[in-house]
Image: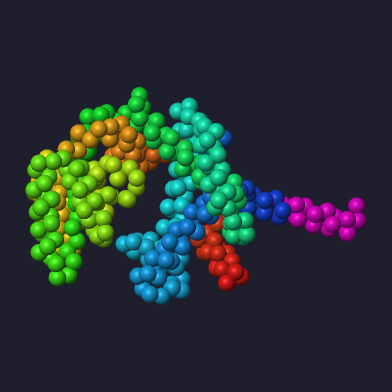
Amino acid sequence: MSFKAIKRLAASVCCAAVAAASLTSCGDTTYICRSGDKSVNAGVYIYYVLSRLNSQAYSYYTTNGTASQDIINEKYGDGTMTVGEFSQTDSYSMCERLITAQLKFDEMGLSFTDEEKQQIEDTVESNWDADYYESMGISKDSLDQIQTGIAMLDKIFHAYYGEDGEAAVSDSEINTFLTDNYVRFKLISVEKTEGKESQAKATAEDYAKRAEEKSFDEVIKEYQEEHSDDESGADTSDGSEEQDTDNNIMINKNSSSYSSNQVVKYIDGSMQNGEIKTYEDDNYWYVIQKLDVLSYGDYVKDNRDSLISEMKSEDFEEVIKGWTDSYQIIRNDDSYSRYTPKSIYKKYQKYQEKNQ
C-alpha cells in the first residue's frame, strides 16, 4: 500500500471516529425523559420553559414598569435561583408529571371515551399555530401530549378519590368540609343612591318585615316586581335563568374571592341559620336570610366532583409527587443540556422580531 493510500485510510478512520463521537455526544434529543415505553417529547419541555419565562417576563414588567434586559438571569422568588434555573427545574418536573400520568393511567386501567378523545383533539387544534410553535421547536404532537396528560390526571384524580377509589371521599367528609368552609344565604340588595340613603334603609327594613310573614323567595319576587325599573335588586349571583328561580347563594367563604367580603363575614359571624337581618355597607342596604348549607336539596350530589376537587387538589399534588418518586424516570441529559432557557428564549425573541 502506498504512503498516500495509508494517509487516506488514516484520514477516513479519523473522520469516522469524529462522526461517531459526534453522534454519541448529541444523542437523541427528541425526548426529555422516559420510563419504560413511555416518554415525553422535548417539545413539551420547550413549551413549559417558554411559558415560565414569558410569565416571569410579564411579572417583571408589571412590577417594574419596564421590560427586563436579561430575564434569564433575573432573581426568582427568594433569590436562591435565577428565572432561568427555575424555568428549567419546574418545567422538567412538569414533564416527569406527564410520565407519571401515563404510567398511572395504564396501571389503573383507565381509558378515554370517544367524546373525551374528541375534546382533547379539539383543544389542541384550537390552540395550534404552526408558524409559532414550529419556530420554537414544538410539534402538534407535543401539544397533544400536554393536553392528554392534563385529561389523564383529571381522570386519575376522580378515580382515586371517587367511589371505590383508593382514597374515596365519604359523604361525611364532604359535609364536614361544607360546614367548615361554606355559607348559604338569600338576599335583597337595595342601592343607597345619593341623597336617598335613608330611603334605602327604610326599604330594606320594610322587606325584612315582610320576610317574617312570607317565604323569603316570595319577598324577593315582590321586590323584583316592585323595583323592576331600579338598577338594584335581589342578588341573583350570576344572572342565569337557574338563579331566577333558585335564589340560594352557596359560596366558599374562605376562597380568595370572598374571604375579605364584609357581607359574607357578617353572615358567617353574626347570623344563625334561618335568621333574617338587615346589613349596611358603603353602597347598599341588604336584607339577608342565612340558611343551613347541609339542607340545600341535591347540592352535594350535583356538585360532588367539584367539591372533591376543592377538598383534595392540594393533597393530590403530594400523591403525584409520591408516585413520581416511585417510578424509574430517566432524564435525557442531551436534551436537557441542548434546550437551555437561553437558547429557547433566543428563538422566541427572533420570532417576535420577525413578526412585529
Closer to us: 84 or 111: 111
Can residue 155 be seen from the camera position used here? yes
Asked whether 12 falls inside the magenta stretch, the response is yes
Closer to us: 296 or 4: 296
Principal SS element in the magenta part? helix
Residue depicted at 22% across the width and 29% down the height: 172
Q: Quadrant of residue 308?
A: top left
**Magenta segment:** 1-17
Residue 131 vertical placement versus 186 (above, below): below
Asked whether 333 falls inside the magenta stretch, the response is no
Residue depicted at 45% across the width and 47% down the height: 94
Residue depicted at 16% across the width and 40% down the height: 215
Q: Residue furthest top?
A: 164
Can residue 315 be seen from the camera position used here? no
Image coords of residue 6 (percent x, y): 85, 55
Image coords of residue 167 (percent x, y): 32, 29
Q: Is residue 176 left or right of 351 when viewed as pictured? A: left
Figure quadrant of the C terminus: bottom right
Residue depicted at 24% across the width and 44% down the height: 247
Closer to us: 213 or 256: 213
Image coords of residue 251 (percent x, y): 24, 46
Q: How many marks?
A: 0
Q: Is residue 219 left or right of 46 when viewed as pictured? A: left
Q: Quadrant of residue 312?
A: top left
Residue 285 vertical placement versus 101 (above, below): below
